[in-house]
Image: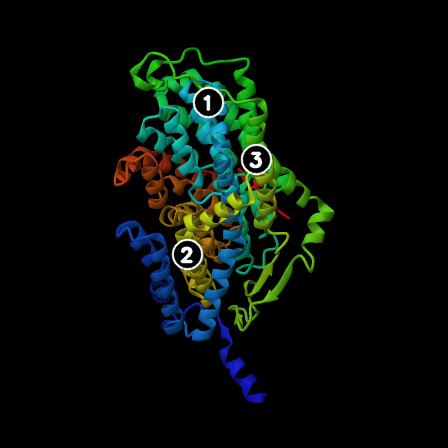
Amino acid sequence: MAAMADVLLAEQFQIVTDPVADSVALSAIFAVLALLTLFLLLGVFRVRAWLAGLISLGVALIVAVTVYSMPVGQALLSASEGAAFGFFPILWIVINAIWVYNLTVVSGHFDVLRRSMERVSPDMRIQAIIVAFCFGALLEALAGFGTPVAVTVVMLMALGFPPIRAASVALIANTAPVAFGALATPITTLGTVTAGASSDPRLTTETLGAMVGRQTPILAVVVPLVLVAVVDGRRGVKQTWPAAIVAGVVFAAGQFVASNYISVPLTDIIASLAAAAAVVLLLRFWQPARVDPAVEPEPAGGGTTRTVVQRDTNVEVLRAYAPYLIIIVIFAIANLGPIKDALAQEPWTVVFHWPGLDVLGANGKPLSSTNFTFGWLAAAGTLMILAGVLTAIVLRVRPGAALRAYGRTYVELRHAIVTVMAVLALAYVLNQSGQTNTLGAFLATAGSVFLFLSSILGWIGVAVTGSDTSSNALFGALQVQTAAKAGLDPLLLAAANSSGGVLGKMVSPQNLAIAAAAVGMAGKEGDIFRKVVLWSAVLLLFMCVLVTLQGTPVLDWMVPRG
């Protein structure tokens, strides 16, 4: 027994910030290697994301063991916990949310949904707002991870948008809702990685969601105006600004209210449906001054009139929207106070220490991130399965067809599954070995300037990984540790990582590849990139200024204090 205790004690690891010659600067050279590897493999050498993730994980493990003296067993256990967290709850949400979408495709009701949107307005500028911004945000809320871009690009093409324009519109629209995508998976991840890196009690999913809900809504007001500008330039803005403003303002209000007062996971669902309803209501009383032929879909066959659109019954249209209504009802019930509290208790939610993992922080206290929360019933992904079962019943999808669709969902996402698990494993190794601490200590030397740079760091993370979730996993702890060193607000900087990150979506190689493939222009990602990169840079600058002002007396009243 004594020998066993000695072995266990020997395996215990305590984080050291300056393992190389007692120098944070020299140690940072090694601490950045894994991230640099990931950036170069994805951004320069265009290696597939799943392979880049695995290679970078290997680099992080080597640095952890050889430079930071982390025991091999502890390093591998750290990676295993990160990979497990990547699957549950993150991928568990994504897989089951996309399954619900696939059920609508199998039943034919996705086409019904598309046709119902087409009938709302013949104006392509309005369609860009409804399909790319409102419906795209709903898809982001349910699935994320590239799904909104893939789906809305196809819908825009079906409505007559030229390929490059369809791709550009879909990518730009996929910004404001990203932080709360996949039922707020990025925020959940951010809460997990930051809680283990700081003692600030505000670093929870709820408070982080509230803070992000005081940043991205301001961005949301601008995005619909950008969309109509991309579709039809200044004329488009001049003729359709009422619809753009209504969509942006209502979406922003929905995001703020839902994230601060209702439910962080439901934020984008509420905001997107409210925005869509507001635009549809507006169109009952107002239409653009004129619909210019240059922005109308080209008629099939070169004729002068539109092809006759199939008319769906009201019952079929209601069924097409039913899956999203079901999801809202289920999550609303699950988030009721007594029910939410009950689901957070055993046996529905089990919290346990990751077996064998024994890591102490630089302060000598055990890291909270070594505790794993397994809310098997309370998890959003489990609730999505219930929604999927009810959706199959409502859409009259036979059990066999529903199961086959579920199997196909795993096959479709096989590379995404490996990527997310690898990136989360990488994040855990970086955090629990001390590499993130080293980078935080080094960046803290920038002092208050880091307040401006924090959003850019999030942007880089998403631009490279294609995922706000992955960026938060990689840099969330780094942001709060840097905040502590520089005397800045850790809640503000953590939120800035996610809010700034959303603007990297439109230029990430993965999203560009998805958009190009969807419009049949594989290999032309550079053409699409040139259409969106300026918008990404301008909106990022806007977010940097906003975050900086929120860190000063000018706007610091926007930051939750308790």
Q: CA distance from mark 3 to mark 1?
A: 21 Å
Label 1 Cα neighbours within 10 Å, binned few <14 / some 14-19 / many ≥20: many
Disc 1 or 2, which lies upstream in sequence?
1
Q: Residue at x 61, y 46 (%)?
A: 386
**Location of mark 1 (residue):** 118
Residue beneath disc 3: 395
* Three-letter code for the amino acid on which mark 2 is drawn: Val
| Circle 3 residues within 10 Å: few <14, some 14–19, many ≥20 | some
Q: Are marks 1 and 2 in contact (CB under 8 Å)?
A: no
Q: Earlier in the sequence, mark 3 or mark 1?
A: 1
The residue carrying pointer 2 sits among few (fewer than 14), some (14 to 19) or many (20 or more) residues within 10 Å by Cα, namely some
User: Label 3 to label 2, Cα distance in Å?
Assistant: 31 Å
Give how far across and how far down residue 385 sits, in percent: 58, 47
Hey, which quadrant is residue 388 in on the image?
top right
Q: Amino acid at mark 3?
A: Leu
Q: Is residue 435 above or below residue 334?
A: below
Secondary structure of the residue carrying numbered label 3? loop
Residue 297 in picture, x, y percent from top left? 36, 20
Dot placed on the residue nearer the N-terminal end, 3 or 2? 3
**Pointers 3 and 2 in contact (CB under 8 A)?**
no
Q: Amino acid at mark 1?
A: Glu
Residue occupying image coordinates x 48% and y 19%: 119
Q: Quadrant of residue 210?
A: top right
Image mark for residue 418: 2
Is residue 265 something one can see in this rendering? no
Q: CA distance from mark 1 to mark 2?
A: 37 Å
The image's colour scheme reads rainbow
